[in-house]
Amino acid sequence: MKKIVFLSMILAVLVTSCKKDDSKTTTLNYKDSDPIKMVFQDTHKIKVSSDYDITYEILNTDTIPVVRFESKGVLKALNMGTDKVRISNGYETKTVDVVVDLFTEPPFEFGCGPSRIKELFGEPIYSATTPDNSYLYYEYIGTDPATNYMYSPTCYHMDFYFKDCANYEQAELYIRKANIVFSLNKYLRNNFDFLFQYPNFYYDSIITHDSVPADIYQNKLNPSIVCFKYEHANQHDDYGLVYRELDIDSLANSLKTRPRSSKFLY
């Protein structure tokens, strides 16, 4: 008799513990993007909440590890590529894509006004115009001391040039050289076709004290977009990437007249 009573008590406890709490909702509140876009070496906390405990799983869909969890719900970007993350609270499950790029490309909305760039990136840390008002210049450099880097872990900063102080004509990025040469070449190979090398593109007055050539690339999806890659772009010995919208016939003339930061009085 005592055994029957004891077993009945255990069953009552189990039934009570397995019963869903009516004061909680089973909804998985996902408020992040899909795909989640990250840049190499960056971290991202997934924006999701639930009344029940959330579990996370990386599905490892790529041939190399692309992301890992640095802590619960916080992704760390390990390599360029794509993966998927499964999120569940025991009642609802959601699978989202994760895309890791080497860096965030500048917008290809050439011809837009300065207000559009501010809409995308906020107020520049610095701006200037040439003495003849032929160009307006915006400089973006991240200033969050907690991240211990500038614009992003791999991109030192971004510059934007506006012809006649009105029309977005050129973007220039400074890419950190350390440990990313292979990844930078992979980015260019995946997104651009190599056209030719242009000699004497830039004079390096700090590292080599000599002229530096540039490799010229054409965007695979949008042939009107060209990218110039050159070395020793600044005192940090970064790579410089210059983006413009050009047809191939006008490329040579553009190389001779492109705006240089030495024009700006700062």
Image: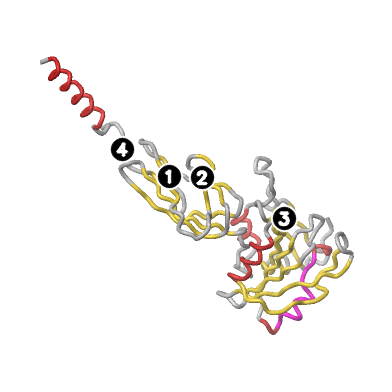
Residue located beneath label 1 in the image? 56
SS for callout 1: strand
- The amino acid type found where label 3 is placed reads Ala
Residue located beneath label 2 in the image? 69
Q: What stretch is highlighted in magenta?
A: 250-260
Q: Which residue lies furthest to the bottom in this view?
A: 249
Q: Nearer the viewer, residue 126 or 18?
A: 18
Residue located beneath label 3 in the image? 178
The earlier-in-sequence mark between 3 and 4 is 4
Examine the residues drawn in magenta and state their main secondary structure. Answer: helix
SS for callout 4: loop
Q: Where is residue 74 in the image (x, y as percent from the top left)?
A: 51, 43
How many residues crowd around disc 1 within 10 Å: few (fewer than 14), some, or many (20 or more)?
some
Q: Is residue 259 magenta?
A: yes
How many residues crowd around disc 4 within 10 Å: few (fewer than 14), some, or many (20 or more)?
few
Question: Relative to residue 137, is residue 96 drawn left or right?
Answer: left
- The amino acid type found where label 1 is placed reads Tyr
